[in-house]
Image (spheres, grey):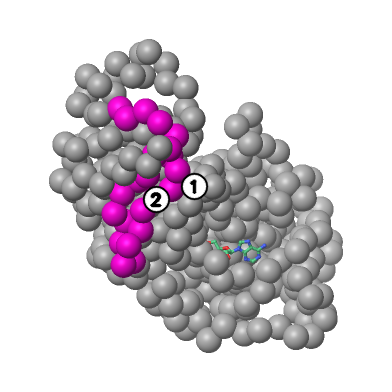
């Protein structure tokens, strides 16, 4: 169902080119396709939650495999004539020319960037292999599945303390491993007062046996048996296309957009994790939908402006009458 592009310049010009076909991009494409717009969606095929077997918290789709949601989404948008292309966008030039890696170029009147983010994980042995399985970050997504079990939070990011306090709601047995994190006295007090156990020592590796996490090994060889561990990754937005177009960032390094995803650059919208690290799948889908509404209204404004100009040129007397 997804086309691969071979040619250099397709010559095609779309009302909207959407970059990224996760929940945000596909949701926008669905609305725009139904609004009779010509739309192309280009996707590199690496959605953020791909390592997880199940997606939770999406009303009516709770527990569905992430790939199944996207497959259903692609089938829905394809029904409305949206063109789905496999590829990676290398650059967008003002105006807009969307250049894919390998050469093909698409024209667009408006751009929606929904390219998500990447999770940078700490270099502890076992973390990458178990990511999305029993190494987790979001209790709302996967906390219920490990509720009541022995859990640990790895102190690899300043956000880990808050994460641990939150996680306590899912289990009475949560160990906080400061690892290399320098805990302030107040943080230590908050953790202990809330029933978390703090175990000092550098983390050596995760102990994995038979495709399951068994525990966390600390320097010196002590192994803490745990059913799952949580960590806070460093979230890095895939925002190079937006910054390349001149979109401004806030002081935390995220591209600034209004509630509809409109950036400071005319004609450029963004939705999902690329502008909001907190967006869950359902939120990202909502952001895509909101952006599509605003984007379409912007196109209508432009079409009306042009129609009025044409109208005035073709009937100069009417145009002058109001003056
Ligand atoms: C392990 C894990 C489990 C999760 N579980 C859940 C869960 O259970 N429930 C939940 O609600 N949320 C969950 N999340 C969060 C969820 O992944 C995000 O909310 C969601 O993916 C955001 O959607 P998005 O459309 O913004 O980005 P994505 O889904 O990441 O989609 C972005 C798409 O853009 C593509 N792309 C990027 N750059 C380019 C480019 N230059 N050219 C073309 N394409 C490009 C990517 O390849 C990708 O396909 C989880 C996250 C992780 C890490």
Q: Is residue 69 magenta?
A: no
Q: Position of residue 164 (x, y in %)?
A: 32, 34
Quarter of the image with the C terminus in it: top right
Q: Which residues are magenta?
A: 198-219
Residue at (84% x, 64% y) in the render: 313
Residue 144 sits above or below residue 180 on the image: below
Q: Which residue is mark 1?
A: 124
If you read the primary sequence from the N terminus, does the residue marked by circle 1 or circle 2 appear first? 1
Residue furthest toward the top? 185
Q: Please name whichever residue, 80 or 249, is drawn nearer the observer in this view of the structure.
A: 249
Residue at (33% x, 40% y) in the render: 222
Q: In the image, 43: left or right of 139?
A: right
Tell me which secondary structure the magenta stretch mostly adopts: strand
Can residue 290 be seen by looking at this rendering? no
| SS assignment at label 1 | loop
Label ID, residue 206: 2
């Amino acid at each position: 169902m997804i086309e691969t592009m071979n040619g250099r310049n397709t010559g095609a010009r779309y009302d909207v080119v959407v970059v990224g076909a996760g929940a945000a991009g596909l949701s926008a494409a669905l609305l725009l396709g139904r609004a009779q717009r010509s739309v192309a969606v280009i996707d590199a095929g690496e959605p953020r939650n791909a390592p997880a077997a199940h997606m939770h918290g999406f009303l009516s789709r709770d527990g569905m495999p992430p790939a199944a949601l996207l497959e259903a989404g692609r089938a829905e948008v394809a029904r409305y004539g949206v063109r789905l292309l496999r590829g990676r966008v290398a650059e967008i030039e003002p105006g807009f020319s969307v250049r894919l890696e390998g050469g093909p170029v698409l024209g667009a009147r408006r751009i929606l960037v929904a390219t998500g983010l990447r999770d940078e994980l700490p270099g502890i042995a076992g973390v990458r292999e178990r990511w999305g399985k029993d190494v987790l970050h979001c209790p709302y997504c996967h906390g219920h599945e490990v509720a009541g079990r022995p859990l640990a939070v790895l102190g690899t990011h300043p956000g880990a303390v808050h994460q641990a306090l939150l996680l306590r709601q899912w289990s009475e047995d949560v160990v906080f491993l400061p690892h290399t994190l320098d805990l302030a006295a107040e943080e230590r007090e908050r953790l202990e007062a809330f029933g978390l156990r703090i175990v000092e020592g550098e983390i050596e590796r995760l102990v994995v046996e038979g495709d399951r996490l068994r525990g966390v090994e600390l320097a010196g060889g002590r192994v803490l048996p745990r059913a799952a561990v949580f960590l806070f990754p460093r979230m890095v937005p895939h925002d190079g296309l937006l910054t390349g177009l001149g979109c401004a960032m806030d002081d935390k390094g995220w591209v600034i957009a209004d509630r509809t995803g409109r950036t400071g650059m005319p004609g450029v919208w963004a939705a999902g994790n690329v502008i909001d690290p907190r967006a869950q799948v359902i939120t990202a889908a909502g952001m895509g939908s909101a952006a599509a509404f605003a984007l379409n209204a912007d196109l209508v404004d432009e079409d009306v402006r042009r129609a009025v100009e044409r109208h005035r040129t073709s009937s100069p007397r009417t145009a002058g009458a109001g003056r």
